[in-house]
């Protein structure tokens, strides 16, 4: 086939979807947010103190002495909290964007298929069975989340004979309802433990440590690699399941892989943070509104912006009522609710963002 | 029937939805480079047959594409052999035209891979060939009906499959655009040696473009053969349940026109 | 936001005091019917109750302390003191009126008043006294007197209040003088929920000359029970740490010392971390003196 007669020939194809620019901008924002969140806290430390402590730990010795307590505040309390917030936010936002792609549903997020309800039940059981609850809690929450989503998948496939988006989402609603009911019931039976269960459900990074960071990094890393690997396939799915199939993609296999990866990462994240809501929905939508609908952009930029968003939200949780905490879930929902209305309004005028 | 020479071969093809047969006992063989027009009343099984060929519905029997049994192929391999243009494609409105066409390269990319420069070049050449080069960076949602039609065709061609399945390819277009689109398919068929199977609502266009015609009736192949043999007053009247007349225009092309039934209850 | 909370908390505290039981001085002898004022308003008891149901662990302790124990026929699952109470599986936080009615009580005491529970019980003509968590010792004493009047043990209630007053005063007198500015961090749970000096517990500890680090954010934030940030606790560097989360959550001096960064605290270095019996610490009944004595003993170890 020879070159066609129309213009544009010789110029070659237009450049691929611009990914580098939005990613760099998001990274720059993340760096600024991280620096600010590390510099500010309820403990009123000077910027010089913070810089000295951080420099000290990366092998750079600056003049001046810092007290042991200030050292501990920066390195053992504040920094792990900022980093953990970034990891959890990144995971929730990436998981949300992936779920929205694979279910082609703008309201999908990792909580949709029962991660939240399952993790809530697991955490509640761990808390009320009391002994060593603090060590058991993340493991129980993680297990609960994974069990709930697996059950959703089984029920969804059993109910309809094959796993369509609709049958899985409906199964997720049913499984979440049952798990939430069980959790509420156990909670009511153990009224004395109401407070810790309630705190966990609202989400918090108040007891973040480096060991929490180490605990979830492997899951978040594996999940991130797998989900980012699907960025092109999620674009293929935008033409619908049937056409994607005729293009050589098995939507069920893609869905199963994406759900498995997103669930593992999300369950690990909420196991240390509690049920922080809204991140998985508002961050990807904000990214779509400001950049491009291609998942090659949406996935990496959601990942980075999710980290920035939750670090900022947690800064609010720490500072707005200092020295008291505000539950993190309250802060994210407080921003998330109005933002959601804004998204819906702008969608009405732009029809069909996905 | 010489197996290796057929682009497409069906043996005892049966498709049923919830126990109700939508297609039964279809046998057919299509030579490379042919254009098979599938005709028949609504619900006769035209779309179902196309979807079975693309393995989008479960079926019994055998379907072979260039000699390979479809049931044994991976999705990816099948997509390298058969490209399918649905009747009403789902359009990601915000995707750029060039990226949409590049989706057709999916069967040649690894699971986690993105397009290579060669794939993008192939997509761009197709856009140019279909007169869409200037629109390469436009979002799909901004294109006209005719442009979208060509764009979807370009995506299917990007699959570089020897067999092209078209489901009512021109139903969304106005009259002038219909002929234009089918001319384009016909040119590409000639250029690339494509085998085309198209469900066609417009019998006149079927008569003018198809090299052979298969008339489906209640899930069975009622008549097959050249357009001249199948598109006759008697056959069409019988199977479409209406009075039609088949005419010849000045160039000798087939023209099928419906006729009002006289003498019915007024 | 904080101003609003303070205002709210103040309003709640005021209402709580206003509704605290006030007993007419004439009601020394059991002359039925009796009317007492509780947090749910005036409650009239027509005759001496003999089938009392307590759905409040603290009220149960108070009833036994004033000598009304023999009239108590059913208590909730959390009423584990004194030993031998007629415990049921009832849960004061999730009640069904039918389950309550099954025990045919003639007086019910609750510490938690879900909407419409009292109204529903009223249709059964069972009087309900609502004695929520006392915000101060004074309110706790009022609750004693109210329960005394309602059960025909007003004299016993007065004696018990007098005993408590004397005992508290004795403990405070005998406690070591702590240095000026001695602060404590009181840990309610491992996520750093704490108490301010405005709470019941905070007021008890103030008697010993201690001040809560949580006061820095305003004493009425979150009803006096704020969740503190770890870095704030570290910077505040409290003189002592009191753990009220050993029973629930296994917090110990060594587990606290092992928390990342906490080893820098002077309370950790000086081993001034003390476990409080949390089952007592959450109640405002007769055993507050045990708790107060425990803290006084800890202070002697720390500063004596």
Image (cartoon, helix red, strand yellow):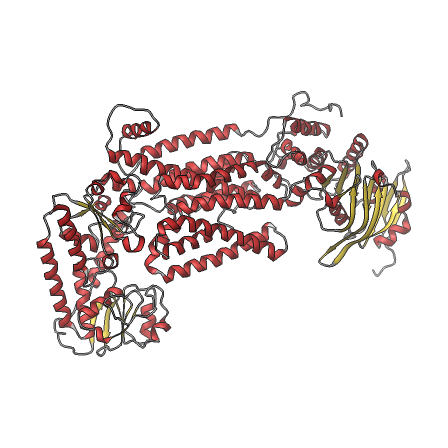
In the figure, is residue C303 to the left or right of C243? left
Tell which of B132 and C129 is nearer to you.
C129
Provide residue B211's location: percent of width, then percent of height.
Answer: 86, 39
Q: Is residue B231 visible?
A: no
Which quadrant is the N terminus of chain B positioned in?
A: top right
Picture residue at 42% right of the left edge, 47% below the top: A271
Image-quadrant location for residue C169 = bottom left
Q: Is residue A259 above or below residue A68?
A: below
Picture residue at 42% right of the left edge, 32% below the top: A30
Image-quadrant location for residue B158 = top right
Provide residue C179's location: percent of width, then percent of height.
Answer: 11, 44
Q: Is residue C84 above or below residue C1?
A: below
Which quadrant is the C terminus of chain B positioned in?
A: bottom right
In the figure, is residue C141 to the left or right of B137? left
Q: Is residue A149 above or below residue C57?
A: above
Q: Is residue C245 above or below residue B70?
A: below
Q: How many marks?
A: 0
> In the current view of this chain or complex, which residue is farthest to the top?
A10
Image-quadrant location for residue C286 = bottom left
Q: Is residue B70 visible?
A: yes
Provide residue A198's location: percent of width, then percent of height.
Answer: 36, 53
Tell which of A186 and C119 is nearer to you.
A186
Provide residue C12's location: percent of width, then percent of height.
Answer: 25, 56
């Amino acid at each position: 086939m020879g070159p066609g007669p129309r213009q544009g020939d010789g110029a070659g194809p237009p450049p691929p979807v611009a990914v580098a620019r939005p990613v760099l901008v998001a990274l720059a924002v993340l760096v600024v947010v991280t620096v600010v969140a590390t510099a500010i806290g309820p403990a009123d430390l000077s910027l010089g103190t913070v810089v000295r402590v951080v420099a000290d730990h990366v092998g750079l010795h600056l003049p001046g002495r810092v007290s042991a307590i200030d050292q501990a505040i920066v390195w053992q309390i504040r920094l792990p909290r900022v980093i953990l917030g970034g990891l959890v936010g990144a995971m929730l936002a990436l998981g949300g964007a992936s779920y929205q792609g694979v279910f082609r549903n703008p309201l999908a997020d990792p909580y949709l298929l029962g991660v939240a309800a399952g993790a809530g039940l697991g955490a509640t059981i761990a808390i009320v069975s009391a002994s060593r609850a603090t060590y058991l809690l993340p493991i129980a929450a993680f297990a609960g989340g994974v069990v709930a989503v697996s059950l959703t998948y089984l029920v969804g496939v059993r109910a309809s004979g094959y796993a369509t988006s609709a049958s899985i989402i409906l199964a997720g609603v049913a499984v979440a309802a049952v798990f939430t009911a069980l959790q509420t019931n156990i909670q009511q039976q153990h009224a004395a433990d109401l407070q810790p269960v309630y705190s966990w459900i609202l989400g918090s990074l108040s007891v973040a440590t480096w060991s929490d960071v180490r605990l979830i990094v492997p899951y978040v890393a594996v999940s991130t690699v797998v989900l980012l690997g699907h960025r092109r396939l999620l674009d293929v799915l935008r033409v619908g399941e049937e056409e994607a199939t005729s293009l050589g993609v098995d939507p069920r296999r893609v869905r199963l892989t994406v759900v498995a990866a997103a669930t593992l990462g999300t369950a690990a994240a909420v196991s240390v943070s509690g049920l922080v809501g809204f991140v998985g929905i508002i961050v990807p939508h904000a990214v779509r509104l400001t950049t491009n609908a291609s998942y090659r952009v949406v996935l990496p930029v959601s990942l980075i912006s999710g980290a920035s968003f939750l670090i900022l939200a947690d800064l609010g949780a720490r500072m707005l009522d200092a020295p008291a905490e505000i539950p993190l879930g309250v802060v994210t929902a407080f921003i998330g609710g109005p933002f959601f209305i804004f998204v819906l309004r702008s969608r009405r005028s732009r029809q069909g963002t996905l | 029937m010489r197996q290796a020479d057929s682009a497409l071969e069906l043996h005892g093809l049966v498709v049923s939805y919830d126990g109700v047969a939508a297609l039964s006992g279809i046998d057919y063989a299509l030579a490379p480079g042919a254009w098979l027009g599938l005709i028949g009343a609504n619900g006769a099984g035209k779309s179902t047959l196309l979807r079975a060929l693309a393995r989008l519905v479960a079926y019994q029997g055998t379907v072979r594409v260039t000699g390979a049994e479809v049931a044994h192929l991976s999705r990816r391999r099948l997509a390298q052999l058969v490209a399918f243009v649905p009747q009403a494609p789902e359009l990601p409105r915000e995707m750029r035209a060039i990226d949409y066409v590049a989706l057709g390269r999916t069967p040649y990319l690894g699971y986690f891979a993105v397009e290579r420069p060669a794939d993008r070049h192939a997509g761009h050449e197709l856009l140019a060939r279909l007169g869409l080069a200037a629109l390469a960076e436009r979002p799909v949602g901004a294109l006209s009906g005719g442009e979208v039609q060509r764009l979807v065709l370009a995506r299917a061609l990007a699959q570089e499959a020897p067999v092209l399945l078209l489901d009512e390819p021109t139903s969304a277009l106005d009259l002038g655009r219909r002929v234009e689109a089918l001319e384009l398919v016909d040119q590409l068929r000639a250029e690339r040696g494509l085998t085309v199977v198209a469900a066609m609502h417009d019998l006149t266009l079927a008569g003018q473009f198809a090299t052979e015609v298969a008339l489906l009736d209640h899930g069975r192949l009622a008549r097959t053969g050249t357009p001249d043999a199948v598109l006759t007053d008697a056959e069409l009247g019988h199977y479409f349940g209406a009075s039609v007349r088949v005419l010849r225009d000045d160039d000798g092309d087939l023209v099928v026109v419906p006729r009002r039934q006289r003498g019915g209850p007024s | 936001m904080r101003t609003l909370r303070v205002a709210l908390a103040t309003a709640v505290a005021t209402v709580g005091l206003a509704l605290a039981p006030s007993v007419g001085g004439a009601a020394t002898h059991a002359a039925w019917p009796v009317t007492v004022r509780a947090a749910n308003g005036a409650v009239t008891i027509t005759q001496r109750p003999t089938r009392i149901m307590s759905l409040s662990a603290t009220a149960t302790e108070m009833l036994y302390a004033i000598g009304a124990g023999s009239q108590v026929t059913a208590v909730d699952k959390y009423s584990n003191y004194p030993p031998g109470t007629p415990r049921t599986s009832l849960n004061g936080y999730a009640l069904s009126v039918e389950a309550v009615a099954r025990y045919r009580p003639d007086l019910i005491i609750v510490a938690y008043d879900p909407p419409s529970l009292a109204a529903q019980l009223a249709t059964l003509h069972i009087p309900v006294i609502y004695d929520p968590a006392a915000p101060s010792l004074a309110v706790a004493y009022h609750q004693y007197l109210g329960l005394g009047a309602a059960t025909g043990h007003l004299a016993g209630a007065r004696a018990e209040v007098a005993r408590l007053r004397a005992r508290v005063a004795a403990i405070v007198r005998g406690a070591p003088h702590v240095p000026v500015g001695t602060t404590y961090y009181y840990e309610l749970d491992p996520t750093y929920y704490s108490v301010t000096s405005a709470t019941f517990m905070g007021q008890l500890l103030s008697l010993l000359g201690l001040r809560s680090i949580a006061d820095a954010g305003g004493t009425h934030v979150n009803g006096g029970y704020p969740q503190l940030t770890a870095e704030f606790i570290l910077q505040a560097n409290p003189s002592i740490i009191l753990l009220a989360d050993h029973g629930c959550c296994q917090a110990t001096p060594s587990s606290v010392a092992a928390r990342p960064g906490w080893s820098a605290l002077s309370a950790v270095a000086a081993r001034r971390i003390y476990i409080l019996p949390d089952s007592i610490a959450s109640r405002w009944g007769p055993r507050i003196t045990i708790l107060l004595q425990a803290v006084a003993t800890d202070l002697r170890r720390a500063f004596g």
